[in-house]
Image (cartoon, coloured by chain):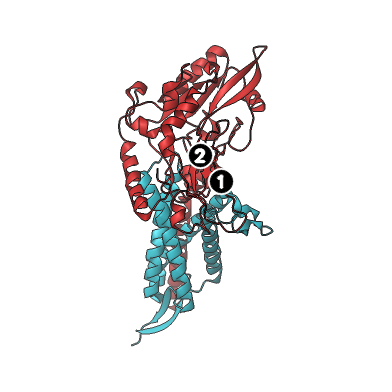
Chain colours: A red, B cyan
């Protein structure tokens, strides 16, 4: 990807967006046996992960053409509180999420059936069912596809990092010096582009599996229609008396983890911080807005009722005064 | 027909005028707050304004203000059709404001639909409604400012000369 985005490439980006819309309606892998309009979810069986890192490596290799190639020196940004986010010299970092590392492995040393064990957990974007990053992006740069993938279009994103602020796990990561903001007002608005896992939308549109699933030697992950994935997750949970994460978090996600130990324990044991998401319970971020949106229907009805009442009261009054005059 | 002094959208009702201005200010402010600029430009550092950097708070207030405005618009339209047009006439600037406001409302409704859990638009249409909602809002604010300076109201009283 060319780091410099001209107006022409912005227009091309528009076509790419339209193309993505078409791509989202293309058949998905036969392996997952899902129709294009079905929401696909992934199942991650924490018991199976050996932390080999093959998924992390494959993610980096396959998505390398999507990684940022920033222009340097970066334009000076105002006011001075606006900080540069530059990962271009640290592209090899793989122990957290970065614009160049969209998947990493978390480690948790916990007690499993009375035995101390280190569990490894692949972490990336959860691909929420109602993603706040896509709902609240002011430019439409982040959006959800019918097959359950949430994407950030690098050609539209201005790098304001709002998606990261509203994401319950603060997943998207910013790279300065790349993207559309360079062609607008680089000193005063924007700060690069936000990057995160796009669940290999381009591979899925070609009938391939996401790279992390494809290369995993232990078959930790599985992708399929959400209801089938949930059914399987619950079956495993029942079988091992285990725990599920991602089914209800943030109102529901398309990444379902199954673990033999409670996620509270895992959350306590993992390293958390910038680029290292936690495993806490998450309430539905958009629930309040969704409820208010439903209530919005009442407002115009109330307005119409008030105007009609005013009209009838006025008409009654004028009829009364006419009656008195006669 | 003799032309008279132009008046506001509320046809002289001071209480409605206050609510309308308050809600327009609230939705404009919280609407601009959907862009990550209030923290960058120290607005949220002003004592009592920390909430302006909370995107969920500004989003909720934006919805709340939009709900009240939708109610007011429904009231204004029906009230004008039932009683207002006998006493008032829409000014040319009112038609301009109505077109721009209709754009804000239409794209705003689509924006609300987009945020619902089970409604998905194409990526290109998402970008279109986001940018056009902002575009209509900026155009409306600009037009409202220019028309306020020119003292052009929404309505003018009409009197019928014999």
Q: Earlier in the sequence, mark 1 or mark 2?
A: 1
A65 relative to A319, above or below:
above
The alpha-carbon separation of the residues under discs 1 and 2 comes to 10 Å
Q: Position of residue A4 (x, y in %)?
A: 42, 50
Q: Residue at x 48, y 70 (%)?
A: B10
Have a look at marks 1 and 2 and say if they share a chain: yes
Closer-to-camera residue (A124/A149): A124
Q: Among all residues in the image, which is located at the extreme right?
A: B47
Closer-to-camera residue (A271/B53): A271
Instruction: Determine if residue B64 is in view.
Output: yes
Q: Is residue A273 left or right of residue A127?
A: right
Q: Position of residue A194 (x, y in %)?
A: 49, 44
For disc 2, the marked residue is A99
The answer to whether the residue labelled 1 contacts the one labelled 2, judged by CB atoms less than 8 Å apart, is yes
For disc 1, the marked residue is A85
Q: Residue at x 40, y 51 (%)?
A: A5
Q: Does dot 1 land on a helix, a strand or a loop?
A: loop
Closer-to-camera residue (A308/A68): A68
Q: Position of residue B141 (x, y in %)?
A: 47, 66
Q: Does dot 2 land on a helix, a strand or a loop?
A: loop
B134 relative to A156, above or below:
below
Question: Residue under mark 1: which chain is it in?
Answer: A
Q: Position of residue B49 (x, y in %)?
A: 64, 57
Q: Residue at x 42, y 49 (%)?
A: A156
Q: Quadrant of the C terminus of chain A?
A: bottom left
């Amino acid at each position: 990807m060319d780091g410099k985005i001209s107006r022409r490439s912005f227009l091309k980006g528009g076509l790419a967006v339209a193309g993505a819309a078409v791509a989202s309606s293309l058949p998905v892998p036969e392996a997952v046996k899902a129709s294009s309009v079905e929401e696909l979810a992934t199942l991650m069986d924490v018991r199976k992960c050996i932390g080999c890192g093959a998924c992390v490596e494959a993610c980096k290799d396959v998505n390398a053409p999507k990684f940022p190639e920033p222009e340097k020196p970066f334009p000076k940004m105002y006011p001075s509180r606006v900080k540069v986010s530059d990962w271009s010299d640290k592209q090899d970092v793989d122990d957290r999420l970065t614009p160049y590392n969209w998947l990493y492995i978390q480690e948790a040393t916990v007690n499993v059936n009375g035995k101390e064990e280190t569990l490894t957990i692949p972490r990336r974007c959860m691909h929420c069912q109602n993603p706040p990053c896509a709902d609240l992006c002011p430019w439409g740069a982040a959006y959800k596809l019918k097959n359950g993938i949430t994407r950030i279009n690098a050609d539209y994103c201005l790098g304001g990092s709002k998606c990261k602020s509203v994401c319950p796990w603060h997943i998207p990561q910013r790279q300065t010096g790349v993207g559309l903001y360079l062609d607008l007002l680089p000193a005063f608005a924007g700060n690069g582009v936000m990057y995160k896992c796009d669940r290999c939308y381009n591979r899925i549109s070609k009938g391939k599996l996401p790279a992390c699933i494809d290369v995993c030697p232990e078959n930790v992950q599985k992708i399929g229609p959400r209801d089938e994935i949930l059914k399987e997750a619950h079956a495993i949970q029942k079988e091992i008396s285990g725990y599920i994460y991602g089914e209800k978090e943030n109102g529901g996600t398309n990444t379902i983890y199954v673990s033999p130990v409670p996620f509270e324990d895992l959350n306590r044991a993992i390293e958390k911080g910038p680029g290292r998401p936690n495993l806490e319970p998450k309430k539905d971020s958009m629930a309040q807005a969704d409820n208010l949106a439903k209530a919005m229907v009442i407002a115009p009805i109330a307005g119409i009722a008030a105007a009609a009442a005013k009209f009838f009261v006025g008409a009654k009054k004028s009829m009364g005064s006419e009656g008195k005059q006669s | 027909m003799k032309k008279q002094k132009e008046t506001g959208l509320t046809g002289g009702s001071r209480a409605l005028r206050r609510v309308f201005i308050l809600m327009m200010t609230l939705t404009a402010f919280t609407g601009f707050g959907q862009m990550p600029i209030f923290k960058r430009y120290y607005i949220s550092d002003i004592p009592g304004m920390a909430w302006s950097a909370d995107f969920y708070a500004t989003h909720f207030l934006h919805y709340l203000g939009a709900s009240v405005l939708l109610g007011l618009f429904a009231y204004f339209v029906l009230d004008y059709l039932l009683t207002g047009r006998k006493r008032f006439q829409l000014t040319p600037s009112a038609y301009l404001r109505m077109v721009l406001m209709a754009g804000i409302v239409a794209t705003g409704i689509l924006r609300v639909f987009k945020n619902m859990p089970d409604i998905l638009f194409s990526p290109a249409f998402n970008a279109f409604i986001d940018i056009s909602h902002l575009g209509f809002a900026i155009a409306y604010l600009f037009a409202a400012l220019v028309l306020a300076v020119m003292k052009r109201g929404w309505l003018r009283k009409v009197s019928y000369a014999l």
